[in-house]
Amino acid sequence: MTPSSPLRDSPFLADWLSPVCRDSVDSIAQIRQLSPLSLAYLGDAVYELFMRTAYLCPPKRMNDYHRQVVRKVRAESQAECLQALYPYLTDAEKNIVRQGRNASPRRTKRVSPELYQQATSLETLIGYLYLYDLPRLQELLDKIPLDSE
């Protein structure tokens, strides 16, 4: 069973994660010009915020929070997460994932380039959905398995 979290239980994801300047026509045009790596940069932050929120309850020592979140935001875990979500993705979302994979740097220090590309792909998708479709982002984030400790 997946642990409960304030974010998972909230019907108000948009209140937790509301994009800035979404309604301005100029902003929408600028958002559409963002590169996959820019979307991944944003997606990395959104994903980490989701994980931090998901593990916030029940209260724990700060070190325990940190260990749980770091374990989930590592490239290896993000690659596993993408593989788990892939069957649920639409063709358009798979295209975003492909763009993120192709934009990912080929050289990494700690993990294989393939794992890093998958992690970047997930972050790109999350960044994209954060800007364009918060309900869909919530739907996919709810499918991410959280381990309880």
Image (cartoon, rainbow, N blue to C red):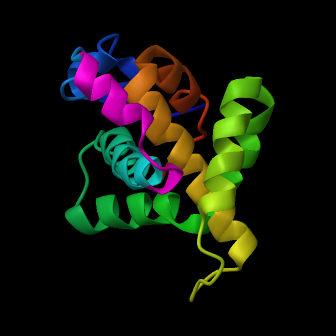
Residue displayed at 35% across by 27% down: 29
Q: Is residue 84 above or below residue 73?
A: above
**Where does residue 98 sit, x and y in percent of width and height?**
72, 47
Can you tell which quarter of the image residue 61 is in? bottom left
Residue displayed at 36% across by 45% down: 55
Q: How many marks?
A: 0
Residue furthest bottom as drawn:
109
Q: Considering depth in this image, is 95 or 64 the residue closer to the camera? A: 95
**Where does residue 87 sit, x and y in percent of width and height?**
80, 31
Q: Is residue 83 above or below residue 114?
A: above
Residue displayed at 24% across by 14% down: 23
- Residue 147 seen from this side: no
**Where does residue 71 sit, x and y in percent of width and height?**
49, 64
- Magenta stretch secondary structure, dominant: helix
Residue displayed at 59% across by 73% down: 105
Magenta segment boundaries in residue numbering:
25-37
Q: Is residue 69 magenta?
A: no
- Residue 88 seen from this side: yes
Q: Considering depth in this image, is 97 or 112 the residue closer to the camera? A: 97
Left/right of residue 25 with respect to residue 87 in the rendered view: left
Q: Is residue 148 above or below residue 12?
A: below
